[in-house]
Amino acid sequence: MKWKTRVSELMDSEYPIIQAALSRIGNWKLAAAVSETGAHGCLTAAVSLTPEKLRDDIKRCRDATDKPFSVNITVGMCPHIDEMLDVCLDEGIEVIETAAFAGDPYGKRIKEAGRTWVHKTATLRHALHAQKAGADAIIIVGLEGIGFKNVSQLPTMTTIAWAARHIKVPIIAAGGIGDARTFLGALALGAEGVMMGTAFMATRECPISDKFKNRMVKAFPDNPHFRTTVLAPPNPKMYEEVMKKRNEMPLENWLTAMERVMLKHDDWEIAPEMWNEDYDRLSSLMSFAATYVDHIPTVQEFIDNIINGAEEILDSWEFLKR
Ligand SMILES: Cc1cc2nc3c(=O)[nH]c(=O)nc-3n(C[C@H](O)[C@H](O)[C@H](O)COP(=O)(O)O)c2cc1C
């Protein structure tokens, strides 16, 4: 079966499945491995830290795969953001993703260079804004997801079905997607592609510890602490306090403080070590997609499972054959 949608066409991938940006984790090796499967890998520019390293990482990714991959620049979090974008444009990256805060000025430059601009947001209001600003596709992350949260964020099912009524450009659904059923469900809700972060963290190629991956295997979505941590939006008071300090500390420190608020991770200061430790609160760094993690597959096995599983489901629906 051909999984051709406007999203797979924009991404030039076999399947409308995209790997999400993952700060500190989303390196060229993971992006290349994902693109090799027929899904679409994404390099997180902030992982490269400097424009020079990003250029190097793009080249390494190209050496590792002939397939297309994109680059995420997370507004407000990615250091040297203008220079990072220069590198992406210079290196001929066709699809560039902005995220977190409004990406308009970067989107304008991406479009002027004739490239594809994809913006990631958490609300319909921001999606409408990005559409008006010229985004070619919009990723909408529902409450079941992890990462930047918004006080107005809705569950994935509601937000995607609602957005499908109002957004004309292709929608990419994210938030709690991690298996054939959730993939197919997102398409039925009106998305033309899915993006997954947590699910790709639970693959062998992801550069985090086996200990953390095994936490995902053991995670239960109905664990009260896990449930509350995933579904609760960030603390608005903490967010305002950090925003006020924007000009009072070096950018690196401010970004770390903001990540801590947005990812609701109280122990963010120990971030470099956290992947190897067993802190109780690490559940705040995985989403409800952990529900579907029952082993740690390779990226290829993971994508094959989704595609084969989705085709089996469609095949089992007798009413489609009448
Ligand atoms: C550890 C971690 C780091 C993340 N870092 C970023 C980031 O730097 N930029 C960004 O746009 N999103 C980031 N995200 C969010 C993901 O890109 C994606 O939106 C989210 O994982 C989707 O929900 P899911 O985990 O349920 O698939 C991060 C998520 C996690 C778990």
Image: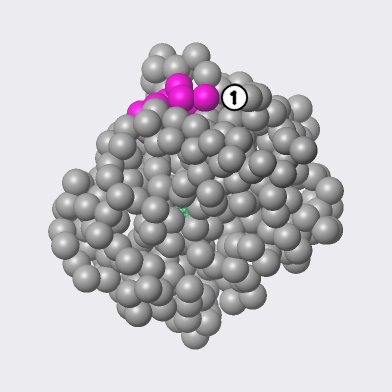
Looking at the figure, which quarter contains the N terminus? top right
Q: Is residue 107 above or below residue 70?
A: below
Residue at the image position 64 percent from the left and 63 percent from the top = 157
Residue at the image position 76 percent from the left and 63 percent from the top = 162
Mark 1 is on which residue type?
Answer: Glu
Q: Nearer the viewer, residue 220 or 101?
A: 220
Q: Nearer the viewer, residue 125 or 290?
A: 290
Q: Is residue 51 visible?
A: no
Secondary structure beneath disc 1?
Answer: loop
Q: Quadrant of residue 200?
A: top left
In this view, which residue lies farthest toward the bottom?
237
Q: Which residue is mark 1?
A: 14
User: Could you tell whether 78 is left or right of 274 in the image?
Assistant: right
- Look at the image and say whether residue 164 sits in the magenta stretch: no
Residue 51 coordinates in the image, percent (x, y): 46, 34
Categorize mark 1 by other alpha carbons within 10 Å: few (<14), some (14-19), many (20+).
some
Q: Is residue 203 above or below residue 233?
A: above
Q: Nearer the viewer, residue 119 or 279?
A: 279
Residue at the image position 17 percent from the left and 52 percent from the top = 211
Q: Quadrant of residue 296?
A: top left
Q: Nearer the viewer, residue 63 or 34?
A: 34
Looking at the figure, which quarter contains the C terminus? top right
- The magenta stretch spans which residues? 29-38
Tell me the chief SS of the magenta region. Answer: helix
Residue 281 coordinates in the image, percent (x, y): 27, 71
